[in-house]
Amino acid sequence: MPPPQAVDAATASATKAIERYVHALVNDSNIVQGAAILPLAPVETTPTKKSIVLVQKGVALRAHEASAILERMLAGTLHRDYVYASGSQYMVTSVQPHSVYGRLTSMQTDGGIIVVKTNRLLVVATYVEPALPAEAIPQVERFAEQLVSIDF
């Protein structure tokens, strides 16, 4: 078994790589407003790290929202009720084998949420108008495929 320092270093390196991917998804696209990455395996929280969110950019996913999305996605029940992310409410409109798509219920703006499960991670991405689902969904799905290709 590797020493704890080696495991911590590998985890930190993997988190940095994922962080670069998330920043590229949000910054380079002008379509995806925000994204968060959640690990499928349980993560121990500490006094300095109170959330299970590994990386997030452009979205403020609260700990209880992240936990609810993760638990319901793993149980296959995410589509049965509204999805809450960053204080916004989304209604699920489409369910795929590894993905769930929803639209923002706010009357002030249009937008949506995309939740994609990979082998080891859950990707939660949001978009707002003028971006359309037909633009955002393929982009987030490609992002998830990139994560799978590097064993996430």
Image (tube, rainbow, N blue to C red):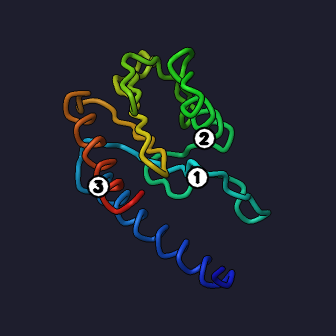
| Position in image of residue 109 (x %, y %) | 36, 23
The local secondary structure at tag 3 comes to helix
The numbered disc on residue 17 is none
Which residue is tagged 3? 146
Mark 3 or mark 1, whichever is nearer to me: 3
The amino acid type of the residue labelled 3 equals Gln
The numbered disc on residue 66 is 2
Pick the quarter of the image with the C terminus: bottom left
The amino acid type of the residue labelled 2 equals Ala
The image quarter in which residue 141 lies: top left
Which residue is tagged 1? 53
Closer to us: 89 or 100: 100
| Position in image of residue 86 (x %, y %) | 54, 37
| Position in image of residue 60 (x %, y %) | 54, 46
Tell me the residue at 39%/60% (across/down).
151
**Mark 3 vs mark 2, CA separation in Å:** 22 Å
First in residue order: circle 2 vs circle 1: 1
**Mark 3 vs mark 1, CA separation in Å:** 19 Å
The local secondary structure at tag 1 comes to loop
**Circles 3 and 1 in contact, beta carbons < 8 Å:** no
